[in-house]
Amino acid sequence: MSKAYPSNLTQAQYECLSDMIPDAKPGGRPREVEMRDILNAIFYILCEGCRWRALPGDFPKWQTVYTYFRDWRLNGTWVRIHDYLREWVRIDHERQPSPSEAIIDSQSVKNAAMVSKQVGFDAGKQIKGRKRFLTVDTLGLVLRVLVTAASVGEREGGKRVLKRVKPMEKAVSRLHTIWVDGGFDGNPFMMWVMDVCRWIVQVVLRPEQTKGFVLLKKRWVVERTFGWLMGCRRLVRDYELLPETSETFIYLAMIRIMVRRLA
């Protein structure tokens, strides 16, 4: 690297990730690129929001960087790294690796002009684009992410994201309560969570006759997480053709936050 970018990993941060980087495939040409440069290039895309083809010339070729990004998305490497770091951050905060409570919320974001797949209109927020459903623990660390069309309802999206949390087994072995806002309120959703997931749903409603910002119990945690994500320009608007790619960038944003804390 000929230039230090703000998004680059420090030596201590890279050491936190180096043991989790998959080894090169056996056979064929040996790996010629430095994995630290690959990670720096991916984090540059995340933080600066540029196109893959617009990567600065002192990074490896964009085709190489994108191949690593795509392959690790398909084989689950990014999610495994994310889950491993989340447990260590919880331990660093003197918490159990498995949370006992979680919070769900959604965020609707506009899509870029070239994005046409799985795009809808959120009538409540008057936004055409996609909707991000996040499940976080009480520290604001993401458990699972779901990106859908913005037209998907809160309860339907809540079911789908909880279906991703349930198979995590040991990682959510202590989980018993899900905190939600009024958009998820309703007996069908609450009964589904109790019957299928064996968890209790607690609804936090905004106090009546209140104006302006109100700090809601438990609910503010997930809002703070959405604020963290908005610090990455790639996530301010949905530029990805596939929702799965959008989900991966959210995991990457959390990886960057957690590795900075641990380092």
Image: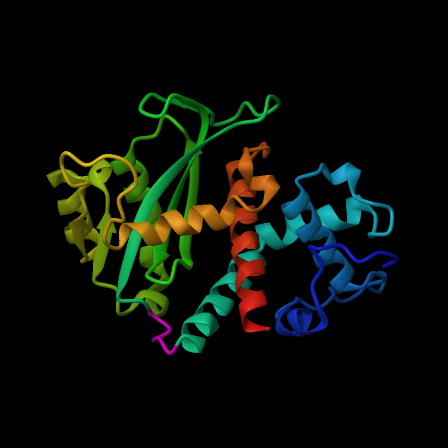
Side (left or right) of 205 relative to 170: left
Q: Is residue 60 left or right of residue 73?
A: right
Q: Identify the residue at image location x=75%, y=50%.
A: 65
Asked which quadrant contains residue 75, the reply is bottom right
How far across and how far down the image is residue 70, in percent? 65, 47
Residue at the image point whose x is 20% and y is 38% from the top: 182
Percent coordinates x, y for residue 32 in the rendering: 85, 62
- 28 sits left or right of 196 in the view: right
The N terminus, quarter of image: bottom right
Tell me where residue 246 appears, x and y as whole percent: 54, 41
Report x, y in % for residue 158: 29, 42
Give the prevailing secondary structure in the magenta stretch: loop
Residue 86: say if magenta.
no
Which residue is rendered at x = 67% and y = 71% of the image? 18
How many numbered discs sit on the rendered protein? 0
The reply to whether residue 62 is in sight is yes
The correct choice, above or below, for 254 with respect to 205 in the image is below
- Residue 164 shows in this picture: no
* Magenta part of the chain: 94-98
Viewer-side residue, 128 vs 222? 222
In this view, 163 is above or below 241: below
